[in-house]
Amino acid sequence: MIPSKVRDLMNEQVKNELESFYIYLSMAAYFHEQNLDGMAHWMRVQAHEETTHAMKFFDHIIDRGGEAVLLDLKQLKKTWSSPLEAWKDAYAHEQFITSKIHAIVKVVRAENDYSAEPLMDWFVKEQIEEEKNTDGIARQLERVGESKDGLYMLDKELAARPWPAGSCFDPASYNAPGA
Ligand SMILES: [Fe+2]
Ligand SMILES: [Fe+2]
């Protein structure tokens, strides 16, 4: 049985991950508007990934006999004043998510909830990756500065982020014949 304190924080984390989905999809929309389709693509892939994060917590609660409760979602932000501001926000958002993950680890330890540790280990490592990615792109964009060519090159590079195998967020999947 999952300790109730862990269950409550994990239900809250399902919400946080789904709000991440929503903000990254908003960023994708913003980048499309800016004709930065590579950045938009990167954010679409990230948005999909966030739904898988939510599902990992959702499944963990249910697998351990807890009640999964879907909390109300908030729209965090809809538009940005520059691509750099959006990437900096993405990094700040991932730092916020890291703090939430660490807060869950703290309670998991206090409750001696050994069954939750493998999942939380996965998320602790994942957050290192998420911060590195978003901070890395923000820094690259800072170096690009006002260079139109540099922005074009970076956008092209980000267009190459692969979809996870079989992703239903890949337009090739939902536009397939018979889909
Ligand atoms: Fe996440
Ligand atoms: Fe990731």
Image: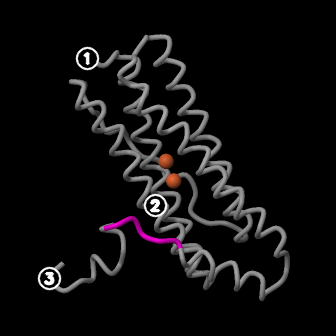
Reply yes or no: does residue 69 show up in magenta: no
Quadrant showing the N terminus: top left
At numbered mark 3, what does the secondary structure look like: helix, strand or loop?
A: loop
Disc 2: which residue: 47
- The residues bearing labels 3 and 1 have C-alpha atoms spaced at a distance of 42 Å
Q: Is mark 2 within 8 Å of ligand 1?
A: no
SS at circle 2: helix
Q: Name the residue under label 1.
A: 1
| Residue most extreme to the left | 178
User: Could you tell me what secondary structure mostly forms the magenta stretch?
Assistant: loop
C-alpha gap between disc 2 and disc 1: 31 Å
* Above or below for 131 versus 108: below
Amino acid at pointer 3: Gly
- Comparing 46 with 8, the one in front is 46
First-in-chain label (3 vs 2): 2
Residue at (42% x, 49% y) in the render: 18
Chain-order first, disc 2 or disc 1: 1
Q: Nearer the viewer, mark 2 or mark 1?
A: 1
Q: Residue 40: image x %, image y %?
A: 54, 74
Q: In which quarter of the image is the C terminus?
A: bottom left
Q: Residues within 10 Å of mark 2 (few under 14, many from 20)?
A: many
Asked where in the image residue 151 lies, by quadrant, the reply is bottom right
User: From which residue to which does the magenta span run?
Assistant: 161-165
**Residue 164 highlighted magenta (yes or no):** yes
Which image quadrant for residue 66? Answer: top left
Residue in view at x 47 percent, y 49 percent: 19
The amino acid beneath tag 1 is Met
Mark 3 crowdedness (10 Å alpha carbons): few <14, some 14-19, many ≥20: few
Residue that carries the numbered disc 3 in the rendered image: 178
The residue that appears at 54% across and 19% down in the rendered structure is 106
Q: In this view, does 128 lie above or below 60?
A: below
